[in-house]
Image (cartoon, helix red, strand yellow):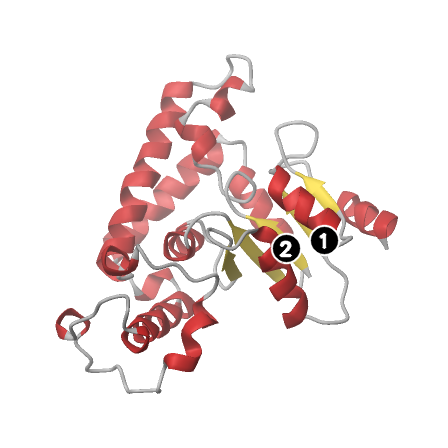
Amino acid sequence: VYIWDMDETLILLKSLLDGTFANAFNGSKDSRKGKEIGTYWEDHILQVCDKYFFYEQIENYNEPSLSGLREYDDGKDLADYDFSKDGFDDANKRKLAFRHRAIAEKYSKGLENVLDQEMMKYWDDLYNLTDNYTDGWLSSGRALLEQHHINVLVTSGSLIPSLVKCLLFRLDDLIVYSSWEVGKLHCFKRIKERFPAVRFCVIGDGMEECDAAQRMNWPFIKIDLHPHRFPGLTMRTVEHYIDVIY
């Protein structure tokens, strides 16, 4: 099982906005263009969250995963359910569970079942613009994912925007855990319970996932601009790290 950190590992956003990515290239990258690209992503991610994924209603309530409220869901048919008039507040676990189920269904069906063709073209163009600016960082990370059978994503961001980012950055169908309130070690333990008796490898850019991987005795591969980055990280390198630990 490959456990991936999301922000600044598979997805670049903060480093575009603050110029960190451009600065690492010693002037060969236009930092203003990077910030402009990052701002496009940031503004529109929130719009998609609020318009299609109930984020304005549930942003103050975060679960580590979409399955966290399953016990409160009575299976009610939501086909004609009016989410705008059900008197929702985040203390009502049943109505919150309904929203999580609706979000899970949208997530599993993919972006093309949420957005119209005009918006799909906008996101395709923005993705390609970002991938070109970052020398193929996004597409290289995605290509590595496609070589593995089981990929799990753990993010320090809140759950719903992270799911939306997965859709918009073409990281469809990943299992996602949010460590926003519980920490990454807690998420790693839950993942181990979900996938018993297998080997794990953690890939990320931060100290929290590094420390959590060490606590679990799992190999950790650090992603940054030097020495391991996308593109540049290969399966041969990944397998070397795994062999050292196991």
Sequence-wise, which precedes: disc 1 or disc 2? Answer: 2
Per the image, the residue denoted by label 2 is 3
Residue 176 percent across, percent down from the top left: 51, 60
Residue 162 is left or right of residue 27, and the answer is: left
Residue 10 percent across, percent down from the top left: 54, 45
**Residue type, numbered disc 2:** Ile
Nearer to the camera, 136 or 19: 19
Residue 118 percent across, percent down from the top left: 24, 52
**Mark 1 closeness class: few <14, some 14–19, many ≥20 residues within 10 Å:** many
Q: Residue furthest front?
A: 91
Q: In 3D space, how far apart are the residues under numbered discs 1 and 2 (Cα atoms)?
A: 6 Å
The residue at 55%/18% (across/down) is: 25
Residue 231 is left or right of residue 22, and the answer is: right
Residue 54 vertical placement versus 221 (above, below): below
Q: Secondary structure at mark 2?
A: strand
Residue 53 is left or right of residue 210, and the answer is: left
Residue 32 vertical placement versus 160 (above, below): above
**Residue type, numbered disc 1:** Cys
Q: Disc 1, disc 2: CB below 8 Å?
A: yes
Q: Secondary structure at mark 1?
A: strand
Locate residue 101: give its quadrant. Answer: bottom left
Per the image, the residue denoted by label 1 is 201
Visible in this render: residue 150? no
Residue 190 percent across, percent down from the top left: 61, 65
The residue at 30%/55% (across/down) is: 59
Locate residue 36: give its quadrant. Answer: top left
Q: Which mark is residue 63?
A: none
Residue 153 vertical placement versus 209 (above, below): below
